[in-house]
Image (cartoon, helix red, strand yellow):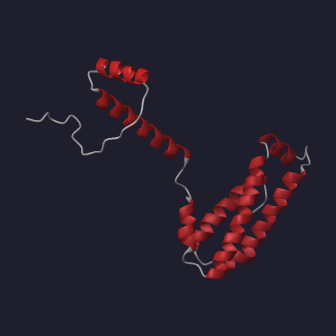
Amino acid sequence: MARPRKLTERGTTVSAYVPLSLYSEFQRLAKSKGLTVSEYIYRLIAEAVQKEKASIVAADPPADPPNALQSALKGLEPLDRERVLLFMKRLEEAEGRLAKLSPDELKLARSGRLTSSEVDNVRKTVIGLKQTYERTIKRNVRSPDVLDIIGERLLELMKVLEVPP
């Protein structure tokens, strides 16, 4: 008669090399918990996977995933799609340039105590993006999903740089 399975769910065997000292440690810890080495390692792996899932969810918020824009772009005409992609590229460049600036530099530039050419350049770029959005993107692109995604990102940049809407 076969021994009953302790892990009832179907699975697969995973082999891994571990030094003897680590295996001895696994044996000691498993025995102290009343488990076999396999059960103990299974629990360690399951805990590690749960922690990794939690850290991914915390680090990557579900708001505006790149797939949302890509799926929204599929319904656009080719010319409009190109316009939006070019606009997004310029928007991402402005976001990158803004991210390189220190919070103190931004605060001083807003208060007028520091004249930073980089802050001024990013502000001018964002003003240009705002005009492009209003004149071209908003008039030609009829997809509310695309307009929402782009508009929210542009507004966020405008708030940070105190560009009036």
Nearest the camera: 121 or 3?
3
Occupied quadrant, residue 132: bottom right
User: Would residue 105 appear left or right of 58 to someone viewing this image?
Assistant: right
> Which quadrant of the figure contains the N terminus?
top left
- Where is residue 110? Give x, y as percent: 84, 48
Occupied quadrant, residue 12: top left
Is residue 111 in view from this perspective?
A: yes
- Where is residue 156? Give x, y as percent: 69, 56
- Where is residue 38? Give x, y as percent: 30, 31
The residue shown at (66%, 65%) is 151
Occupied quadrant, residue 150: bottom right
- Where is residue 111? Give x, y as percent: 86, 45
The residue shown at (78%, 70%) is 131
The image shows residue 64, relative to residue 84, as above or below, that is: above
User: Would residue 98 appear left or right of 23 to someone viewing this image?
Assistant: right
> Which quadrant of the figure contains the C terminus?
bottom right
The image shows residue 107, relative to residue 87, as above or below, that is: above
Nearest the camera: 34 or 162?
34
Total marks in image: 0
Is residue 158 in view from this perspective?
A: no
Q: What residue occupies the far left of the structure in this picture? A: 1
The residue shown at (24%, 43%) is 9
The residue shown at (75%, 67%) is 130
User: Would residue 151 appear left or right of 68 to someone viewing this image?
Assistant: right
Nearest the camera: 138 or 17?
17
